[in-house]
Amino acid sequence: MIDTIVNDVSAIFSSTFMNGDWIALLIAFGSVLVAALVMKRATQIGAMTLLGLVLFVIGWFMRGVLRGPFPESEAGAAAAATGNRMLAQINAQWAQFMGMEAGTLLAYFITFMLLIMMIFGVKSVVQRG
C-alpha cells in the first residue's frame, strides 16, 4: 500500500511539475508558492494545501478558457465563444474530477503538501535569519 502511494505521488509530481510545459509549471508552482506564502503556522498545512489545489484548478480552468484564438473576430462573437468555452471547460473538468480515483486525489494532496511545507520551511528560515 505504501509503495502504491509513493508511486502515485512520484507520478503526479513528475506529470505536474516536470512536464516541460511552461504555462503548466507557472500555474503549479504559482499555486504552491501562494499557498506557502499565505501560511502563517505549520499547523495550517491542511487548509493551505487545499488552497493550493483550488488555485491549481482555477489556473487550469482559466488556461482552458483562454486557450487559442477565437474563430470570429467580432467582439460579441468572441464573448459568446468565451462563454461557450467556459461551459465546456466546466463540464469537462467536472467529468474528469468525478472520474478521478481516490488514490490520485490523495497523491495530488500529498505532492502539494510536501512542496508547500518545503517552501514554508525556507520562508521560515529566511524570516528568522
Image: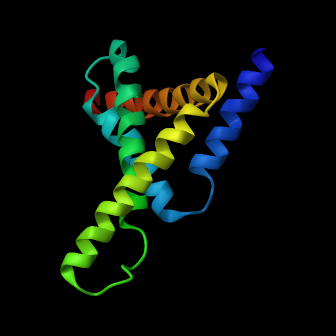
* Number of dots carrying numbers: 0
Q: Residue at x 71, y 22 (%)?
A: 5
Classify the position of the C terminus by image quarter: top left
Depth check: 56 or 22 in front? 56
Q: Quadrant of the N terminus?
A: top right
Tell me where residue 4 appears, x and y as whole percent: 77, 23
Q: Compared with residue 108, is residue 2 higher up or lower down, i.e. above or below?
A: above
Residue 29 x %, y %: 44, 47
Residue at figure coordinates x 27%, y 69% from the top left: 80
- Which is nearer the eye, 102 or 71? 71
When asked about the image quadrant of residue 121, the answer is top left
Comparing 104 with 38, the one in front is 104
Outermost bottom residue:
73
- Which residue corresponds to the image point at 34% horizontal and 31% vertical from the top-left? 51
Looking at the picture, how far across and down is residue 6, in whole percent? 72, 26
Instruction: Give x and y (percent) for residue 82.
Output: 31, 66
Identified at 57% across, 28% down, the residue is 105
Give the image quarter of residue 81.
Answer: bottom left
- 8 with respect to 16 (left or right): right
> Is residue 99 or residue 21 the one in the foreground?
99
In this picture, is 127 found above or below 62?
above
Colour style of the rendered protein structure: rainbow
